[in-house]
Image: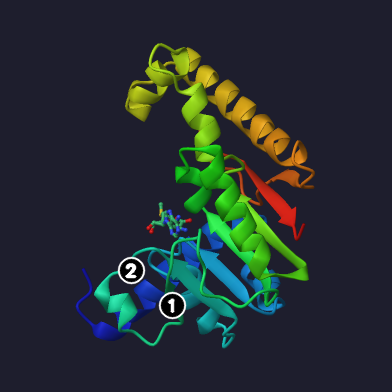
Amino acid sequence: MNQNPEFRNLNETSQIAKTAKARLANLGLTLKELEKFGLVLDIGAKDCYIQRAINEQWVNNVVSVDKTFPESIRKSSLNVLVNDAKRLEIATETVDLALVGASAYYYTKTEEETLAILQEINRTLKSSGQQRVYPARFGHIIKKLLTPESDFAAAKSLAPERRSKKDIEVIMFNDHIANLKSLEFLTDRGIFAKMREGYEPNAPDNFKHYLTIPKF
Ligand SMILES: C[S@@+](CC[C@H](N)C(=O)[O-])C[C@H]1O[C@@H](n2cnc3c(N)ncnc32)[C@H](O)[C@@H]1O
């Protein structure tokens, strides 16, 4: 490992940008595109890589939100908000873009929980605002498909390197069903949404799609 601090910083900088770009690509965005937005919330930001990468471009439009942050992040100069997505301390109709990458929606257990998050994020959006959600599904829908006796649960329980071609097909099929059911969950409630593939192809058994949900 290079002990020179300047080299360590450079390595860290490129790692932050690389990870941020991959997270944004999953949401159908680039860093350049993100720069053009007004206020952006990164919900479930964890290590705040998206905010850190955009700040490196001398842009400061991202607020990182998570229900828990390590002390090092809470005490840093980063713009962070310790909030659950179900209750955001953000003024109504002030946000241009809300990113939800592998976070709040992914972990919902009930319809009510998914709806509470949807409505709370929607409340913060300007009339021209939108949510981007990756992967394009809600946790409560996956939970219904992952019944203990299902082929899906059996395939998911295997370590990735032990999955057969058939297991991967079962996972991909059920992921597709989960995406369609998640889209249907929105349209059944009169909420318009679009499902698209991210910018960069992921591993074959990884998630590919994200949702765009304009202010409703
Ligand atoms: C797997 S990490 C995702 C990190 C990053 N967004 C990414 O794309 O890799 C999930 C993060 O979401 C946060 N999270 C989960 N549910 C949440 C909720 N309801 N409200 C706010 N944050 C939530 C967790 O605390 C965790 O930091």
Quadrant of res 124: bottom right
| In this view, 201 is above or below 184 | below
In depth, the one of 113 and 2 nearer the eye is: 113
Colour mode?
Answer: rainbow
Please tell me which of labels 2 and 1 falls first in the chain. 2
In depth, the one of 73 and 9 nearer the eye is: 73
In depth, the one of 21 and 102 nearer the eye is: 102
Query: Could you tell me the amino acid type at mark 1?
Result: Val
User: Which mark identifies residue 109?
Assistant: none
> Residue at (66%, 59%) from the top-left corner?
131
Quadrant of res 190: top right
Q: In this view, does 159 lie to the left or right of 83?
A: left
| In this view, 31 is above or below 56 | above
**Quadrant including the N terminus:** bottom left
| In this view, 32 is above or below 102 | below
Query: Which percent across, then down, holds residue 180?
Result: 68, 31
| In this view, 58 is above or below 66 | below
> Residue at (56%, 45%) from the top-left corner?
114
> Residue at (44%, 75%) from the top-left corner?
81
**Location of mark 1 (residue):** 80
CB at mark 2 closer than 8 A to ligand 1?
yes
Query: Which percent across, then down, holds residue 99?
Result: 59, 61
Query: Could you tell me the amino acid type at mark 2?
Result: Phe
User: Which mark identifies residue 69?
Assistant: 2
**How many residues crowd around disc 2 within 10 Å: few (fewer than 14), some, or many (20 or more)?**
many
Q: Do the residues labelled 2 and 1 touch (CB within 8 Å)?
A: yes
Query: Which percent across, then down, holds residue 200?
Result: 62, 49
**Quadrant including the C terminus:** bottom right
Q: Is mark 2 on a helix, strand or loop?
A: loop
